[in-house]
Image (cartoon, rainbow, N blue to C red):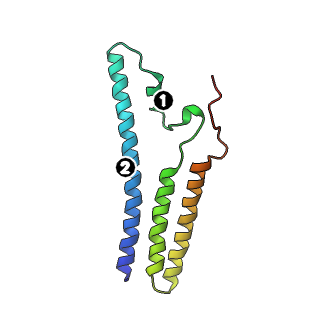
Amino acid sequence: MENSGVAALIAAAILVGVGMQAWVSWLDHKRRTQALDVIKAALEAGREPPQQLYDQLEPEPYASLGLSRRPWGEALMFATLAIGFWIAFGVAEASDERDRFMLVAAVMSAAALGCAALAIFRPGQRKSDDRS
């Protein structure tokens, strides 16, 4: 495979990762917009909106429990990039370029595994809300 094919493969991997993160951000935006619409309708009707609606507007979804959000999106993006660089490593001819692809692929793989571990195990955070 020539250099333009490898570059296209890497660009495609990056675009997939960025596209998935954009999708997650758009879904979060839609969720917050709908919560604001419901709060507005409740206030116009003279009722107090439930606290759960206000909780959806917090910057971090788990902030009210003392938890941060799980980095699944980051793990998926790094994994996608790692796959792209591993493929580029596999199809590259033996040279310094091949070693560079392997280095970047290994770093991206480590970052993906680290994010996945943080998402699964959530170190240093409470498992439940002890507040009353």
Q: Amino acid at mark 2?
A: Trp
Residue at (55%, 35%) from the top-left corner?
63
Residue position marked by numbered label 2 in the rendering: 23
Image quadrant assignment for residue 131: top right
Instruction: Characterize the local packing of mark 2: few (<14), some (14-19) or many (20 or more) Cα atoms within 10 angstroms.
Output: few
Which residue is most to the top?
Answer: 46
Q: How many marks?
A: 2
Instruction: Characterize the local packing of mark 1: few (<14), some (14-19) or many (20 or more) Cα atoms within 10 angstroms.
Output: some
Query: Vertically, is 39 above or below 123?
Result: above
The tag on residue 32 is none
Residue at (51%, 38%) from the top-left corner?
60
Task: Measuring from the top left, give residue 25's x and y in whole percent.
Answer: 40, 46
Task: Measuring from the top left, give residue 13's x and y in whole percent.
Answer: 40, 65
Please, what secondary structure does the residue beneath circle 1 have?
helix
Residue at (37%, 40%) from the top-left corner?
29
Which residue is most to the right?
Answer: 124
Please, what secondary structure does the residue beneath circle 2 have?
helix
The N terminus sits in image quarter: bottom left
Name the N-terminal-most of marks 1 and 2.
2
Image quadrant assignment for residue 99: bottom right
Residue at (35%, 78%) from the top-left corner?
4
The tag on residue 55 is 1
Image quadrant assignment for residue 84: bottom left
Task: Measuring from the top left, give residue 70's x and y in whole percent.
Answer: 54, 46
Q: How far apart are the two marked residues, 1 and 2, measured between alpha carbons?
A: 22 Å
Relative to residue 46, is residue 70 drawn left or right? Answer: right
Q: Amino acid at mark 1?
A: Asp
Task: Measuring from the top left, give residue 12's x and y in whole percent.
Answer: 37, 66
